[in-house]
């Protein structure tokens, strides 16, 4: 994707506005307009990898967005729950528990 092309992604702009123009640029133009649009992986696969990395690193705050984005990109709720369970054995039980707590909130599992 060239510099002139845009997916219309404005998450960085919405989060930081004029406060952090560098973060806005790299989030909106590089990460989402370029990296997420590369042909090497589908958005579905990129989403699953991202959820796995965030779970492994214990980044629950970022998972809120990426779990929903993964659903938009075709990852099912059952696949997300199974991935988090599987990751708990490799990334640590506390990271898995934190990720599943976020998943329960995002995926509508509150009773």
Image (cartoon, rainbow, N blue to C red):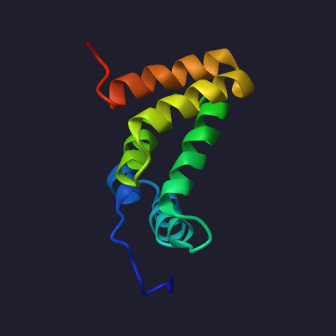
Seen in the picture, residue 35 relative to 94 is either above or below; the reply is below
Residue 82 located left or right of residue 93: left
Q: Position of residue 65 (x, y in %)?
A: 40, 42
Asked whether 78 or 71 is in front, the reply is 78
Residue at x-position 45% and y-position 19%: 101
Number of numbered discs visible in the structure rendering: 0
Residue 18 visible here: no
Seen in the picture, residue 47 relative to 31 is either above or below; the reply is above
Seen in the picture, residue 62 relative to 70 is either above or below; the reply is above
Residue at x-position 48% and y-position 29%: 81
Residue at x-position 35% and y-position 31%: 106
Kindly give the residue lying farthest to the right in the view shown: 90
Q: Position of residue 1 (x, y in %)?
A: 50, 82
Quarter of the image where one finds residue 109: top left
Asked whether 63 or 83 is in front, the reply is 83
Asked whether 39 or 30 is in front, the reply is 39
Residue 106 visible here: yes
Q: Position of residue 84 (x, y in %)?
A: 56, 29
Q: Position of residue 69 (x, y in %)?
A: 39, 48
Kindly give the residue lying farthest to the top in the view shown: 111
């Amino acid at each position: 994707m060239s510099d002139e092309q845009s997916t219309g992604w404005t998450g960085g702009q919405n989060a930081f506005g004029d406060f952090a123009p560098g973060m806005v640029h790299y989030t909106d133009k590089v990460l989402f307009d370029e990296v997420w649009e590369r042909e090497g992986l589908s958005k579905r696969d990129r989403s699953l990898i991202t959820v796995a990395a965030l779970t492994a690193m214990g980044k629950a705050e970022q998972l809120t967005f990426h779990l929903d984005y993964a659903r938009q990109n075709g990852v099912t709720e059952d696949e997300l729950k199974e991935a988090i369970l599987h990751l708990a054995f490799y990334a640590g039980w506390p990271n898995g528990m934190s990720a599943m707590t976020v998943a329960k909130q995002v995926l509508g599992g509150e009773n």
